[in-house]
Image: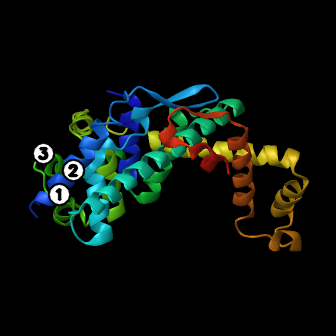
């Protein structure tokens, strides 16, 4: 079991009968993914970022046919039934995979920048931030863990209904989860968790002893890492961008200054965004699979 996957699950947790057409749609998607495209090994390299490979299993959508069915119903109010419907769902699958590859490329660039700045977050920092939040929410660790465990149990039960009992995701959402999460959150669960293997991982999380369920606080580590990264980016911009340096100085010493007031409320975020676009352009991105042509340009534009 991947520790990285366990962490991603925990981070996420912090914040009608099946019709023949539905079965047909699912079979179509599975056949497609296991057919011409599926012949590509899950370990086949689809792209590299500064020499770091990204393999197909990191971006593929094929195990998540239920997600595509869910999205189709949301958009059209019915199950897919025509060849045109299935073609539309296949295009949607391909777009999901292209988007997933773009996100993975950005993540690798981010990891490189974190390493360049020497940013680290230890468990003690994460625990301290967690303790601050628990105090703010009026909870203790036991209460928070109980609530989290109940949330995982609800999601696992819902996913079992979809994956094993083949129930309609819309009905499962209404019956089990409507009061707990948004439809979009449920759609993300379907996308990332609707396989027997992922359900088994979540059940293994529930088997963790009391006090260990939320260790090692992956969400807090990510939050603190992002905060440190933003500070490092701002410091670099201060050294290289005189306008930004003047703004940051005035914002601290004279926030009412016209040069500060005249800037957009998202001025700093805009400057960071420009900084990131330059980092993406500097990265050596090579697409190895022609089905993902254009993704590098999409990231670097």
Q: Position of residue 150 (x, y in %)?
A: 23, 51
Q: Position of residue 60 (x, y in %)?
A: 39, 40
Determine the residue positioned at 72% across, 59% down.
270
Q: What number is the disc on residue 22?
A: 1
Give the answer, above or below, for where 29 lies relative to 196.
below
Q: CA distance from mark 2 to mark 1?
A: 6 Å
Q: Can you give x and y, in whole percent of width and height, for residue 21 in the image?
A: 15, 59
Residue 97 visible in the picture: yes
Label 1 crowd (10 A; few <14 / some 14-19 / many >=20)? some
Color style of the picture: rainbow
Which quadrant would residue 9 be assigned to in this image? top left
Is 158 rendered above or below residue 175? Answer: above
Q: Which residue is mark 2?
A: 26
Find disc 3 in the rendering and name its residue: 164
On the rendered structure, is 157 left or right of 48? left
Residue at horizontal 21%, vertical 50%?
26
Report x, y in % for residue 149.
26, 46
Q: Residues within 10 Å of mark 2 (few under 14, many from 20)?
A: many
Say whether marks 2 and 1 touch (CB < 8 Å): yes
| Residue 194 visible, this angle | no
Q: Are marks 3 and 2 in contact (CB under 8 Å)?
A: no
Q: Quadrant of the N terminus?
A: top left
Q: Callout 1: helix, strand or loop?
A: helix
Of mark 3 and mark 1, the one earlier in the sequence is: 1
Could you tell whether 71 is left or right of 150 in the image? right
């Amino acid at each position: 079991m991947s520790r990285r996957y366990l962490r991603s699950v925990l981070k996420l947790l912090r914040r009608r009968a099946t019709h023949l057409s539905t079965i047909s749609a699912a079979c179509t998607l599975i056949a497609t993914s296991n057919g011409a495209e599926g012949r590509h090994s899950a370990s086949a390299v689809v792209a590299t970022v500064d020499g770091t490979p990204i393999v197909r299993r990191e971006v593929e959508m094929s195990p998540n046919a239920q997600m595509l069915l869910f999205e189709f119903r949301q958009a059209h109010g019915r199950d897919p039934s025509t060849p045109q419907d299935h073609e539309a769902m296949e295009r949607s699958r391909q777009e999901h995979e292209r988007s997933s590859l773009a996100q993975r490329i950005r993540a690798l660039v981010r990891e490189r920048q974190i390493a360049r700045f020497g940013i680290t977050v230890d468990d003690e920092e994460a625990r301290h931030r967690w303790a601050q939040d628990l105090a703010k929410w009026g909870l203790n660790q036991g209460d928070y863990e109980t609530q989290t465990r109940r949330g995982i149990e609800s999601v696992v039960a819902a996913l079992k209904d979809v994956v094993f009992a083949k129930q309609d995701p819309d009905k499962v959402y209404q019956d089990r989860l409507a009061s707990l999460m948004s439809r979009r959150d449920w759609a993300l669960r379907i996308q990332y968790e609707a396989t027997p293997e992922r359900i088994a991982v979540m059940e293994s999380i529930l088997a963790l002893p009391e006090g260990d369920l939320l260790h090692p606080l992956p969400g807090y580590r990510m939050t603190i890492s992002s905060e440190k990264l933003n500070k490092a980016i701002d410091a670099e911009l201060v050294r290289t961008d005189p306008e930004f340096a003047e703004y940051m100085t005035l914002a601290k010493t004279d926030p009412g200054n016209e040069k500060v007031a005249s800037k957009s409320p998202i001025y700093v975020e805009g400057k960071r965004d420009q900084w990131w676009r330059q980092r993406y352009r500097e990265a050596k991105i090579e697409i190895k699979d022609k089905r993902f042509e254009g993704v590098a340009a999409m990231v670097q534009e």
